[in-house]
Image (spheres, rainbow, N blue to C red):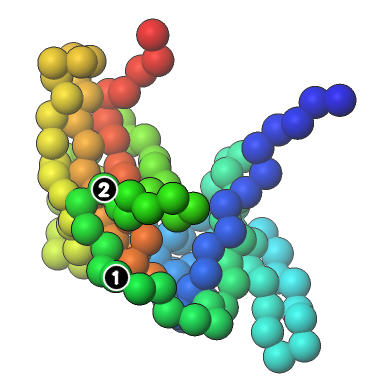
Amino acid sequence: MKQHWSHVALNCRDQQATEDFYRKWFDFERARVVPLGTEQIVFLRQGDVRLELFRATADASGEPTADGPQSTGAVRHIAFQTDDLDAFLTRIGDSVPISLGPLSFENFIPGWRTVWLIDPDGLIVEVSQGYRDD
């Protein structure tokens, strides 16, 4: 039996605002909506990557900082790759808050640069250019 990656589920203050954020800045498309009485689950897709959006029923404590929370059981951040970080940053302008960076990791991998953003629900989203596995 073989397993493969399925999705990341996000709790959202406003599902539409969160969907709009990932559609606009990361090219996700709506894949499916599952109605659950007065609620719904929204599935977004970008290639093989899927996000599942739920309406949050409670607020998380603490403010998003740097590259994400460091407590156990919390998602630190989700990450995307781009081939041109400067073009991505120009595209988002002041529309998306930056929590950290952009930072260079040239000492480890030539051309590796990263910035961390805050999505509408306070989740940290990393965007990197130039990372490669060994």
Task: Please identify the quarter of the rendering in which residue 87 is found.
Answer: top left
- Mark 2 element type: loop
* Residue 98 x/y as whole percent: 18, 57
Residue that mark 2 sits on: 67
Q: Nearer the viewer, mark 2 or mark 1?
A: 1
* Residue 48 x/y as whole percent: 62, 39
**Residue found at the very far right of the displayed protein:** 1
Q: Residue at x 52, y 69 (%)?
A: 11
Q: Residue at x 62, y 49 (%)?
A: 7
**Residue nearer the viewer, 109 or 96:** 109
Three-letter code, disc 2? Asp
Q: Residues within 10 Å of mark 1 (few under 14, many from 20)?
A: few
Q: Quadrant of the N terminus?
A: top right
Q: Residue at x 45, y 60 (%)?
A: 23
Q: Residues within 10 Å of mark 2 (few under 14, many from 20)?
A: many
Three-letter code, disc 1? Gly
Q: Residue at x 57, y 67 (%)?
A: 53
Placement of 45 over or under 33, stated as above or below: above
- Mark 1 element type: loop
